[in-house]
Image (spheres, grey):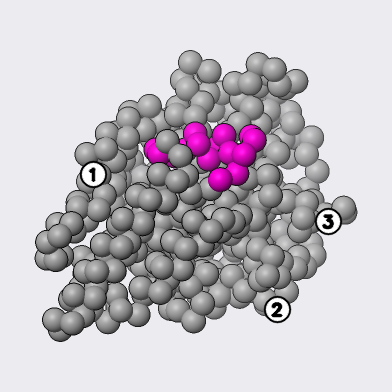
Amino acid sequence: MSDFSSENLFDAYFDSEFTGAIFRRASSKSYLPTLQLLLDLVREGEDSRPFKVAFSLSGSFIEQCERYEPRLLQLFRELVETGRVELLSETYYHSLARFFHGSSEFEEQVRMHQNLMKRLFGFQTTTFQNTEMIYSNGIARRAEAFGFTGIYTEGTERILGDYRSANFAYRPPGCDRIKLLLRNYRLTDDIAFRFSARDWVGWPLTADKYARWLSETIGDCVSIFMDFETVGEHQWEATGIFEFFRHLPREIAKYPHVTFVTPSEIVRRHAAADVIDVPDSAPVSWADLERDTSAWLSNSMQWECFQRLRRLEPDVKALADPAILKVWRYLQTSDHIYYMSTKTGGTGEVHSYFSPYPSARVAYETFQQVIFDLERRVRVVKRAA
């Protein structure tokens, strides 16, 4: 890392060979067969009861598709062209830019992502979900200022209280147009985490059983929102996950009052049931048992790396060097700091499962080496300018 030329800087910081191997494995086991299955279900659906689905695809994911598995982009295009698929907006780099106070980075990344969805898929996004569903009143107001009419977050009891349900649309305080949609984490996790758990009281989870559960759920809407990798990667093909989804639309069709809808259709069809207040001082997310920001900002290693990254912004942008700007933004990806979590118990096991590092300390030290080198490069280029 001693050469201060910014050429090939991305490959100097990131292990593209390792990333490519992981991405191609996930594509083979999960992305490609899942997209083909969803495309079949969308095309087979009757006009009166069509199957519908929504995706939130970061710009980083799209760039990996372009680099490692372009067939994915063609399948996404075919899905969008059916008119039964919605694309959501998020931060381009799946980042924590919302917490860069006094910065325009959050807005820049959201605009970048909107433009990407329009350019690649001809789709104008109207629903937003911030990185890892991190949400507060301030984020809702900023999303409304962008023109979004819907925004997603976790349907946690901490914001619902004792009497409200995740299965309705709500209104953020101080917002006139945008509606708050909530993930039903219990029904989602029945698939994402418990599907293959033989010690779970609900096992085996079959399509007819799940359709019945949905039909018995009270409310206007049920948002099932999970990691793409759930199908085929987290839940392997041998668990029966593909067959579960293959049969689910047919089982749901047995209940006349249950239909598939996209997030924007929920926003148009249903009035806000109430106002939900989530102060900026206590944001929520879909991560860990706490469902807050502690997955990324709870220990000294995470805070140090986050603050060093944040403080680089003025100098990085002043340089107007595309290569340096790109790697700085890739370093914002929330996963890097997530890997530094030192939580224990079941939550710690989840962090370890997703991390490529043997420990949080190694993740921290690796990130520190990169950020230190980037800081040096910025200083040298700045002096030379």
The secondary element bearing badge 1 is classed as helix
Residue visible at 68% across and 70% down in the picture: 281
Q: Earlier in the sequence, mark 3 or mark 2?
A: 3
**Residue 304 image position (x, y, % from top left):** 47, 63
Looking at the magenta stretch, what is its main secondary structure?
Answer: helix
- Whether pointer 2 and pointer 1 mark residues with C-beta atoms closer than 8 Å, the reply is no
Look at the image and give the residue range highlighted in magenta. Answer: 342-357
Label 2 sits on residue:
174
Q: Is residue 144 above or below residue 157?
A: below
User: Which residue shows up at 45% across the image and 79% down it?
Assistant: 103
The tally of labels here is: 3
What is the three-letter code of the residue carrying label 1? Ser
Q: Who comes first in sequence, dot 2 or dot 1?
A: 1
Q: Which mark is residue 227?
A: none
Q: Are marks 3 and 2 in contact (CB under 8 Å)?
A: no
Quarter of the figure that contains the N terminus:
bottom left
Q: Is residue 221 magenta?
A: no
What amino acid does circle 3 point to? Gly
- The residue mark sitting in front, 1 or 3, is 1
Query: Which label number is shown at residue 16?
Result: 1
Residues under numbered marks 1 and 3 in contact, where contact means CB atoms less than 8 Å apart: no
Q: Position of residue 342 (x, y in %)?
A: 56, 45
Give the class, few, some or many, for how many residues have Cα within 10 Å of label 1's Cα (few <14, many ≥20): some
Q: Nearer the viewer, residue 288 or 248?
A: 288
Residue of label 3: 161
Residue at the (38%, 27%) spot, across then down: 29
Residue at left offset 54%, top offset 28%: 245
Quadrant containing the C terminus in the rendered view: bottom left
- Is 65 rendered above or below residue 241? below
